């Protein structure tokens, strides 16, 4: 396109936006500001109708397993959706599609000699399983392309009737020039600088798209309906057998679903940043051509790029991580915490360093909840309830944190700042308060401490880190309802076994056995049940923990101990080898020590050819006389060996058996006259 706009087109804010924007007095009613890709700025979010938010999210093309790039999009938008629904109390209606008709699916099915529907169904189920494992809430509506083909055909017919599409050789193409030149329409609203990018346009058309010479009026035009070739799936249409183009699928599914709620337009459309052009720009153009409207979407939200250890995820770089692989290393909560520490629309690197930061933050909150619960458990009916200076300061910090978290979430869902406020400000302050009370021999005010713990838990429920049924802290209960007997049975079994061991040892007066039984119940019996015991001086503190975490800690401790033992044994073995080598060397008479030396290399020969009376070399392998310094060095070695050899002879004399006169047998020791 030669007349493509160089700047972002005008965006029309929903009421009560005016020409000058939102009136200052109305800002308090619309506190949430979002980064709208249609303006590339943060602007107040205002739903079309009351508290209801109509939201369409581009779903997966189901031709392969879900990877961490998918997690970046769907887990992060799950966080945003939860914040809108559970924090700002919007009635969010989320629609997500499943693309089960696409060139990638057809190609992969042909490669595996499968029916494309079977392949798509398999990976759709796989995707749903991964989302459930990550704790992603299912949408209110899920649409499959294969179930919307009649609507796609009718939609295209309307676009043709409105003058923005044309049929050519059994395919239908969107007329970009006709649309863009029409007053009130703009093509390329999201990425105008991408117009004319042949590589992006070709990728958007799909690998199986082929056009003959003159099929399209312009290279910028894109397929709404593709004529199917032999061996490809097809559906009947006024233009012959074919299938929908990729872009029209989303336009139709979103429009037709939202017509249940009004005019087919929406508040929010979302997807990965790499879909801005041509996919999302083509979606917008098709829908606005169909409805003859100026703005089909009011707010477009995009997640940022995900890199693995600094690089774009790629199988060739061996940094391609599926969601299932990620969940083998870290829990869904840990992955979600990692994502919360990054803005949804910023570039993000996923790797050991980022996960290490998430694990550290998680541990901070785990210990915080343990400390709070310990204070609450220790509370009694006679505890003082009057607020002192410390309690008043803590309440003020709590209110300050609440205000800060709200401001962060209002500022384009700034979860990293919210987490930082909770961890660095509130949690640190509460921990310091509890420690100061403990050091002073006083009890903490359980109500203010509990209130802080409940607030953190509430925000974590909003973020999806904690399930709704938990009163305070992270989930530690089994999923599903279980009876009291089922829940307590394993703990009571461990307690009964421990009691038997202690009674047996006590009757036998075996105090060491009692200590051993105490250690065994702490280290072996309770961790598999999710119970951590910690010795705090004369006190013992119990904490509920994920059994998998405790098992991993125990395995690491055992592995470390095993490694230390192996290192100890290896050190002992090396020492024995050195001792044996030294003992063998000490047995050599000094007059003989140099006679066995040979030169290096394949043609080894005696290193020395002449010796003095003591056996010290005087001439080298070539018969040449050695230098005085060389002989001096060899004499020094000879002297050292003489001392070692004499010690060896002395030890042999002491070890020799005694004769009847109380003297050593003369024949029991080696002859010593060689050690001059």
Image (tube, helix red, strand yellow):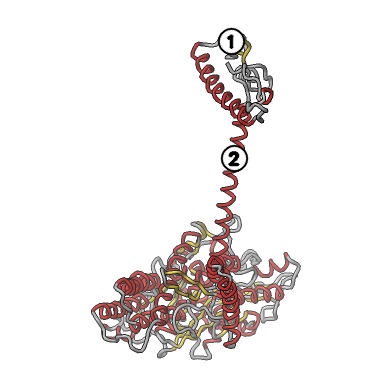
* Dot 2 alpha-carbon crowd within 10 angstroms: few under 14, some 14 to 19, many 20 or more: few
Which residue is located at x 55 percent, y 19 percent? 638
Tell me the quarter of the image containing the C terminus.
Answer: top right
Identified at 24% across, 81% down, the residue is: 388
Marks 2 and 1 sit apart, C-alpha to C-alpha, by: 36 Å
**Crowd class of label 1 (few under 14; some 14 to 19; many from 20; radius 10 Å):** few
Q: Is residue 160 visible?
A: no
Task: Judge by depth and name the residue closer to the eye, 367 or 402.
Answer: 367
The answer to whether 593 is drawn above or below residue 300 in the figure is above
In the displayed structure image, the side of residue 472 where residue 251 appears, left or right: right
- Residue 669 image offset from top left, x and y in percent: 65, 25
Whether 604 is drawn above or below 492: the answer is above
Name the residue carrying label 2: 574
> Of tags 2 and 1, which is closer to the observer?
1
The number of callouts visible is: 2
Residue 460 in which image quadrant = bottom left
Residue 459: x and y, percent?
Answer: 41, 79
**In this view, which residue lies farthest toward the left?**
389
Give the residue number, with chain letter if any, for mark 1.
Answer: 612
Q: Secondary structure at mark 2?
A: helix
What is the x, y in percent for residue 167?
62, 75
Residue 27 lies in quadrant: bottom left
Q: Residue at x 58, y 83 (%)?
A: 487
Element under disc 1 = loop
- Among the two numbered marks 2 and 1 on one chain, the one whose residue lies closer to the N terminus: 2
Residue 131 lies left or right of residue 115; in this view the side is: left
Which residue corresponds to the image point at 39% horizontal and 70% vertical from the top-left? 416
């Amino acid at each position: 396109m030669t007349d493509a706009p160089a700047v972002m087109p005008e965006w029309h804010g929903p009421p009560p936006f005016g020409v000058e924007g939102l009136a200052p007095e109305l800002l308090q009613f619309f506190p949430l500001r979002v980064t709208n890709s249609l303006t590339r700025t943060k602007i107040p979010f205002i739903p079309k109708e009351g508290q209801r938010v109509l939201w369409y999210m581009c779903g997966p093309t189901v031709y392969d397993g879900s990877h961490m790039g998918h997690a970046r999009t769907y887990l992060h938008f799950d966080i945003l959706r939860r914040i809108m629904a559970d924090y700002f109390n919007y009635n969010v209606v989320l629609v997500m599609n499943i693309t089960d008709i696409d060139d990638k699916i057809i190609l992969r099915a042909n490669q595996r000699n499968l029916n494309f529907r079977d392949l798509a169904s398999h990976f759709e189920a796989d995707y749903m399983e991964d989302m459930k494992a990550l704790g992603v809430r299912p949408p209110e509506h899920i649409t499959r392309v294969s179930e919307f083909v009649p609507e796609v055909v009718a939609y295209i017919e309307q676009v043709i009737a409105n003058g923005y599409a044309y049929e050519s050789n059994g395919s239908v193409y969107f007329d970009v020039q006709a649309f863009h030149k029409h007053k009130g329409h703009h093509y390329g609203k999201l990425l105008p600088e991408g117009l004319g990018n042949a590589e992006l346009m070709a990728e958007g058309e799909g690998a199986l798209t082929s056009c003959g010479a003159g099929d399209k009026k312009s290279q910028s035009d894109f397929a709404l309906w593709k004529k199917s070739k032999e061996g490809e799936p097809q559906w009947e249409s006024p233009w012959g057998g074919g299938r929908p183009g990729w872009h029209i699928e989303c336009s139709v599914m979103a429009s037709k679903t939202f017509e249940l709620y009004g005019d087919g337009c929406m508040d929010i459309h979302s997807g990965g940043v790499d879909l801005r052009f041509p996919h999302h720009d083509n979606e917008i153009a098709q829908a606005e051509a169909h409805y003859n409207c100026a703005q089909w979407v009011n707010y477009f939200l995009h997640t940022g790029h995900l890199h693995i250890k600094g690089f774009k995820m790629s199988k060739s770089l061996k940094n391609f991580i599926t969601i299932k692989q990620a969940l083998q290393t870290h829990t869904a909560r840990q992955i979600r915490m990692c994502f919360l520490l990054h803005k949804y629309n910023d570039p993000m690197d996923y790797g050991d360093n980022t996960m290490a930061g998430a694990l550290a933050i998680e541990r901070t909150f785990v210990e915080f909840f343990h400390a709070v619960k310990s204070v609450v458990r220790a509370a009694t009916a006679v505890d003082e309830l009057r607020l002192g200076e410390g309690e008043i300061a803590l309440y003020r910090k709590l209110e300050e944190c609440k205000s800060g978290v709200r401001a962060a979430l209002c500022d384009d869902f700034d979860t990293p700042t919210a987490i930082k406020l909770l961890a660095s400000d509130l949690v640190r302050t509460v921990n310091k308060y509890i420690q100061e009370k403990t050091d002073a021999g006083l009890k903490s005010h359980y109500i203010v401490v509990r209130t802080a713990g409940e607030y953190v838990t509430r925000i974590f429920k909003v973020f999806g880190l904690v399930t709704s049924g938990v009163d305070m802290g992270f989930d530690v209960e089994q999923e599903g309802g279980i009876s009291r007997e089922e829940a307590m049975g394993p703990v009571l079994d461990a307690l009964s076994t421990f009691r038997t061991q202690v009674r047996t040892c006590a009757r036998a007066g075996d105090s060491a056995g009692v200590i051993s039984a105490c250690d065994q119940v702490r280290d072996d019996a309770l961790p598999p049940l999710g119970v951590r015991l910690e010795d705090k001086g004369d006190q013992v503190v119990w904490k509920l923990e994920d059994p998998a975490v405790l098992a991993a800690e125990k395995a690491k401790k055992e592995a470390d101990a095993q490694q230390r033992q192996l290192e100890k044994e290896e050190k002992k073995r090396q020492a024995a080898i050195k001792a044996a080598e030294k003992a063998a060397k000490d047995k050599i008479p000094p007059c003989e020590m140099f006679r066995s030396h040979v030169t290096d290399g394949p043609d080894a020969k005696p290193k020395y050819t002449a010796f003095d009376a003591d056996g010290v070399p005087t001439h080298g392998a070539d018969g040449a006389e050695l230098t005085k310094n060389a002989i001096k060095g060899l004499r020094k070695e000879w002297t050292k060996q003489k001392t070692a050899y004499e010690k060896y002879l002395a030890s042999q004399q002491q070890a020799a058996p005694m004769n009847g006169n109380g003297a050593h047998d003369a024949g029991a020791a080696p002859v010593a006259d060689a050690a001059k």
